[in-house]
Structure formats: C-alpha cells, structure tokens
C-alpha cells in the first residue's frame, strides 16, 4: 500500500461524537448534496443539448439515469476501494474524476460523449465520494449519529435549491459548454471534503513493559487477510430484511418528485407555478431531515429506530396514495408539504438504520451491496411508472403504484424485524469475544495473552509481583470463561479486573 494511511476503522477507538467530527459532518453535507442533487440539476441544460445535437428529450434523460446508476451500482467497487486504501484517498481521487467528467463534457461533439463523460466518469467520481463520507460519519459519531445523519442528509435538498438556479444562470451567461466547465471546477470541492476525512487513530498511551511484550507476540503471529468485500453480512437476517425492503421502497420513492410537475401541467397550470411545487417540497425537506435525526437520537426512540423508519415509509406511501386524488393546485401543494416531511424522514433514517443493523466494521461492505440492489430498482422504478402513464394517460395510477410499493416496503421491514427480533439478540459467545478483543486492543495483560507473556519470559524480574499479576489474570480468565448472558456481563468483568480499559 506504500505510504497510504489505510483507514480501516479500528473498532477499539471510541467515536468522539464531536471535535473534528463536525468537520467530517460538513464534508458529508456537501458530498451528499452533490451526489443526490447533481443528477437533477444537470437537467436544466437538456434543452440546449437537444438543440445542439438534434436528439430527443428521452435521449438527454439518459444522462441523469446513467449518473444515478453509477452512484448506486458502483457500491461494491467503492467498498473494495475503501477497504483497500481508506476513505480519504478514495474521496480525493473521486473528486478528481467528478471534475474531470464535467470538463471533458464541455468539449463533447456528440451525446454519446456526454454519456461517457458526465454519466460514467462524473457518476463514478460522485460514487467514490458519497459512500466513504457515510462510512466516516459512522466512525466519528455514535451517540449523536442519528442527528449527524440527519444533518448530512439535509445537504441534498439544500444543494438542489442552489444548483438548479445556478445552472440556469450559467447557461444564460456562458452556454451549456461554459456551464459544464464551471460546474467541473465546482466539483473540485469534493477533493477538499475528502481532505477533511482524517482517519481515526487510537490514543497514544504509555504502555507497560508487559504490554509491549504482548504486542510483540501479536505482531509475530500471522494476521488474517482483510476482506475487500465482506459477503458475510448476508448471514445477518436483519440485513437481508433491510435490503429487500429498501429495494422495494426505491421502486416508488423517487417517482412522485419526477412526475408532480407534469401532473400540475396536466391540470392546466403554467410552467412557473408547476415548478414551484418542487421548491416547496425541497424547502420542507431541508428542515424535515435534521429534525427527524434529532428525534431519532432521543434515548427512548433510538432503540426502536427501525420502527420509526418503517413509520416514515408508511407515511410516505400513504401520502402518495392520498395525493393521487388531488384535482387542483391546492391539493398538490398539500401533497408536496406532507411528501417533503415523509421524504425527509426516510432520507434521514435509511443509512442510520443500516449502521445500527450491521455495525461499524461491516458497514463499508454492507452499504456497497445495498446500493447495488437499489441501483436495479432505481433503473426500473421511474421508467416503469412512465410506461404505466403512457398506457393509462392518468397520473392517478402512477401515484397509486408508487404509494403501494412504498407501503409494501414498510410492511416488509416491520414484519421482518418482528420475526427476526429474537435472532438479532447478541449471543453470549459473540459478546464475550468482543469484550476480550476490546481489552486486547487497549494493551491489557489479560486472559490467554497474559499467560503467553509469562510463559515467553525466561527469567521475569520480581517473581512475587509477576505471580500476583498471573493470579489476577487467571481470575479474570475464569470469569470470562463462565457462561455470560450478555456482552455487558463480560464487559463488567473486564472493567472490574482492569479498570483502565475503555470499552
């Protein structure tokens, strides 16, 4: 790996829940904004592209589709890159790719060139930034993680409200080529955000000679090869339920924002008034995400966060079902207000719930695999709704289909969580192993490693003192080997015998 500082997220390091974590949160806010808003913001240039290359609207719409497909579909690739090189280097390279794609697109001579540059290269660059930013946010925040996720997710509506008007101004003054070139320069800020993702390192402590000897013994042992993509997450029933529910949800989640403006135009309202609906939706979304994150972080809510997530999906689906009956502009405004609230709740909670299910160590692999599954649904959802609209010429059926899919996802995750709840309980052996590993990371001379140290020393100094240590280690080992009901019991055993440990 050369001189690359690999950020593999040492689980022995406690999340600071602040400090430099706020800088990481700021970077995640910007990256989330670029990732979700850019595929929509680039659509303001479609009319100019149609005129320039003599293509249809469906041809230009593929630009946004390819961008989203790259953002979701390259999830496993991002996981492998992060597990191999760390978050910061991957994000720096991703920022360069995102900028390079837009710069190359400004010199395009055909729509195919824009597919390859803006769609593939820029989409890959945004993907290499989005996923690592979520991973770093998970590592820097624990107690305040729901709030941090909500604040970072708010970057999406904020960026959309900023990038769309900016794109129109750039197109008016510089044309689509100049606009693409300037946007490419703006995307270089992804590199700045990547530079903020400083790896978490364990605190430097003065270690006793015995602990140094233990670590020397550990270093001599062959270390297991780190998995670049951990497929063992599929053994977790909670992860399987989440993945299935999220894939069903994505089928209908993005449909209403795509069709609500056309719905208003179909009812006979002018373009400006129809476009205002998206502004209302985005404005509500800005406040809904951090507010939901704050609520999810409450002590009595957080243990049941998955049910809050299922409620938000149910709320969103029911909003679609009721909104399908809107017959005037007032009804659409009310729909956008409630959809903005529920959409923001889903956006704030979806990755928080995944983090809670799989934990920090497996999150980098889990998020990549989930995004890959969602990529398939993203490519099917809106086009499928469009085909239904072509067949029926009635927007009511489009919203009914979207609402039914999101409601079904809420039912799946609720029933799945209830049925798998007993299986999700931590087994004593697993909790015991976690506690022992945490103690070993802090350099404690406990259990089996303490015995290996004493056996490796030929003539230890201070026999009485060492014998006392050996007795304490043996007592601790006996306590840890006793059947424990929960991981908490093992943790308490280590705390009593080794009070300097931070679990």
Image (spheres, helix red, strand yellow):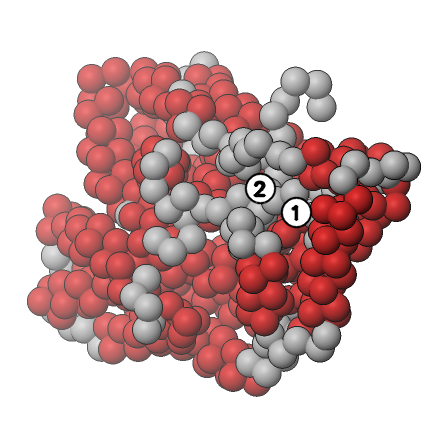
Q: Quadrant of residue 170?
A: top left
Q: Position of residue 255 (x, y in %)?
A: 37, 60
With respect to residue 162, does 106 lie above or below? above
Q: Residue at x 49, y 21 (%)?
A: 96
CA neighbours of label 2 inside 10 A, class few (<14), some (14 to 19), many (20+): many
Residue at the far right: name it: 458
Q: Position of residue 491 (x, y in %)?
A: 58, 63
Q: Position of residue 78 (x, y in %)?
A: 60, 39
Q: Residue at x 41, y 71 (%)?
A: 303
Q: Residue at x 12, y 57 (%)?
A: 269
Q: Is residue 503 visible?
A: yes
Closer-to-camera residue (456/261): 456
Quarter of the rendering occupied by the N terminus: top right
Q: Position of residue 126 (x, y in %)?
A: 47, 34
| Residue wearing tag 2 | 9
With respect to residue 330, does 214 lie above or below? above
| Residue wearing tag 1 | 444
Give the side of residue 411 with respect to residue 370, left or right.
Answer: left
Quarter of the rendering occupied by the C terminus: bottom right
Q: Secondary structure at mark 2?
A: loop
Q: Is residue 72 visible?
A: no
Closer-to-camera residue (274/18): 18
CA gap, disc 2 to disc 1?
A: 20 Å
Give the side of residue 217 with respect to residue 6, left or right.
Answer: right
Q: Secondary structure at mark 1?
A: loop
**Camera-nearest label, 2 or 1:** 1
């Amino acid at each position: 790996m050369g001189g690359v500082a690999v950020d593999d997220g040492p689980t022995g390091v406690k999340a600071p829940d602040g400090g430099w974590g706020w800088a990481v949160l700021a970077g995640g806010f910007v990256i989330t904004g670029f990732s979700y808003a850019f595929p929509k913001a680039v659509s303001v240039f479609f009319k100019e592209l149609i005129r320039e290359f003599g293509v249809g609207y469906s041809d230009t719409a593929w630009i946004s589709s390819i961008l989203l497909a790259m953002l979701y579909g390259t999830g496993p690739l991002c996981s492998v890159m992060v597990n191999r090189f760390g978050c910061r280097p991957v994000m720096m390279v991703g920022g360069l790719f995102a900028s390079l794609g837009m710069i190359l697109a400004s010199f395009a001579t055909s729509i195919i060139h824009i597919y390859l540059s803006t769609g593939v290269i820029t989409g890959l660059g945004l993907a290499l930034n989005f996923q690592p930013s979520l991973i770093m946010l998970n590592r820097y925040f624990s107690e305040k993680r729901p709030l941090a996720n909500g604040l970072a997710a708010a970057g999406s509506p904020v960026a959309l409200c900023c990038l769309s008007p900016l794109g129109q101004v750039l197109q008016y003054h510089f044309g689509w080529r100049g606009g693409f070139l300037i946007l490419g320069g703006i995307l270089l800020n992804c590199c700045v955000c990547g530079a903020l993702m400083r790896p978490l390192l364990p605190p430097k402590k003065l270690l006793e000679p015995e602990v140094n000897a233990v670590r020397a013994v550990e270093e001599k042992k062959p270390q297991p090869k780190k998995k670049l993509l951990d497929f063992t997450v599929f053994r977790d029933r909670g992860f399987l339920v989440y993945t299935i529910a999220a894939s069903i949800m994505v089928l209908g989640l993005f449909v209403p924002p795509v069709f609500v403006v056309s719905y208003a135009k179909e009812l006979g309202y002018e373009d400006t008034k129809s476009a205002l609906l998206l502004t209302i939706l985005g404005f509500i979304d800005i406040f809904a995400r951090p507010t939901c994150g704050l609520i999810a972080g409450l002590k009595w809510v957080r243990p049941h966060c998955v049910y809050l997530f299922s409620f938000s999906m149910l709320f969103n689906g029911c909003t679609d079902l009721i909104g399908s009956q809107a017959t005037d502009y007032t009804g659409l405004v009310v729909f956008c207000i409630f959809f903005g609230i529920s959409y923001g709740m889903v956006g704030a909670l979806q990755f928080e719930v995944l983090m809670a299910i799989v934990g920090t160590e497996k999150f980098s692999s889990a998020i990549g695999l989930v995004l890959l599954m969602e990529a398939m649904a993203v490519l099917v959802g809106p086009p499928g709704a469009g085909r239904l609209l072509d067949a029926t010429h009635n927007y009511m059926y489009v919203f009914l289909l979207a609402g039914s899919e999101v409601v079904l996802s809420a039912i799946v995750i609720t029933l799945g969580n209830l049925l798998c709840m007993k299986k999700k309980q931590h087994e004593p052996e697993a909790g015991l192993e976690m506690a022992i590993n945490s103690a070993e990371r802090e350099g404690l001379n406990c259990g089996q490693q303490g015995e290996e140290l004493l056996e490796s020393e030929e003539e230890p100094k201070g026999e009485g003192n060492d014998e006392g240590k050996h007795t304490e280690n043996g007592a601790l080992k006996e306590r840890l080997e006793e059947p424990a009901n929960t991981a908490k019991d093992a943790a308490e055993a280590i705390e009593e015998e080794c009070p300097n440990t931070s679990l």
